[in-house]
Amino acid sequence: MEIKVFKTAEEIGSAVASIFVDEVKNNPSCVLGLATGASPIPTYKEIIKAFENGGITFKDVKTYNLDEYCDLPKNDKNSYYTFMHEQLFNGLDILEENVHFLDGNAEDSEAECKGYDAEINAAGGIDIQLLGIGNNAHIGFNEPADSFTDGSFKVKLTDSTIEANKIYFDENPMPHYALTMGINQIMAAKKIILIATGPKKAEAIRNMVKGEVTPQVPASILQKHDDVIIFLDEAAASLL
Ligand code: F6R
C-alpha cells in the first residue's frame, strides 16, 4: 500500500484527478469504478475542470458505480445515480449508455447483481477503482462481516452506516438495504485508489493499514492488492 498524506481535501482532489485524467488520456476506452459520498467530490470537480480545459474526451470511457440504495427511485435526489450525474457525469462528454449502476429496485436482485458482474467482466474488468471508506472500514457497502464477499450482492446496512449517511435524507427515511459490488470484485480492479479525510476516519485507516486482514475490517483486504494508493489528510492519517 502506498500512503500519501496531504494538507487539504482539495489537494487530494487534484492529485487523484490527475491519475484519472492520465488514465483517460492514455487509454481513452478505459473502465472506471466510481464511488459516491463526500470523499470523491473534490476529485470529481477537478476531473470536470480538466475536461473543460480541453484535450480530453470521455466518449469511450465506461464507468461502473460501486453501489446503489434499494427501494429509492432512480431519480430520487439521494440516489447514487443522481449524485453521480450532478457531481461528475453532467460536466463531461461521457455517454449515458456507458455509465452503469446496480439497479436497487430490480425485482430479482440476485439476477441484477450477476448481470452487473458479467457486464464488468465483458468490459475487460476495472482499470481504476475509486473508493472511500466507512467509519467502520466498509468499502463499497461491504460491512464488517464473518467472511469476505465475492461478487455484487444485496446488503443490509449497519447502524453505523445508517447513522453516517442519514444526514443526507430529510423527506424520506434512509433505505436500510443496498446493492454493492463485493470484496473479491473490488480486489480484481487493476489499480485501487482510496480517499479518506477527517478525524472520524482515523481509526478505520489505522485498522486497514496496520491491523490484521479480517472481514471485520473489510478495507484491510486492500493490504493484499499490489497496486493501491491511499490518499489521506492529516486528520485521517493521525493514528498511523
Ligand atoms: C460510496 C461507498 C461508501 C463510501 C463511504 C465513505 O459509493 O461505497 O463506501 O465511500 O461510506 O463515505 P464518505 O466519503 O461520504 O465519507
Image (cartoon, rainbow, N blue to C red):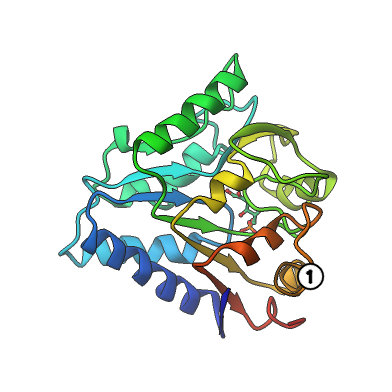
Residue in view at x 20 percent, y 67 percent: 53
Residue in view at x 60 percent, y 14 percent: 107
Residue in view at x 51 percent, y 60 percent: 40
Q: Is residue 209 left or right of residue 90?
A: right
Counting from the top left corner in percent of width and height, residue 98 is at: 31, 37
Quadrant location, the C terminus:
bottom right
Relative vertical location of residue 99 with respect to residue 128 in this rendering, above or below: above
Q: Is residue 96 left or right of residue 114?
A: left
Relative vertical location of residue 237 with respect to residue 111 in this rendering, above or below: below
At mark 1, the secondary structure is: loop
Q: Is residue 182 left or right of residue 43?
A: right
| Residue under pointer 1 | 211
**Residue 235, picture quadrant:** bottom right
Counting from the top left corner in percent of width and height, residue 89 is at: 35, 47
Counting from the top left corner in percent of width and height, residue 82 is at: 48, 39
| Nearer to us in this view, 55 or 60 | 60
The verdict on label 1 being within 8 Å of ligand 1 is no
Relative vertical location of residue 134 with respect to residue 85 in this rendering, above or below: below
> What kind of residue is marked 1?
Gly
Q: Is residue 182 left or right of residue 116?
A: right
Counting from the top left corner in percent of width and height, residue 32 is at: 39, 51
Relative vertical location of residue 174 with respect to residue 133 in this rendering, above or below: above
Quadrant location, the N terminus:
bottom right
In this view, the residue farthest toward the top is 107
| Nearer to us in this view, 207 or 132 | 207
**Residue 99, picture quadrant:** top left
Q: How many marks?
A: 1
Image quadrant, ligand 1: bottom right
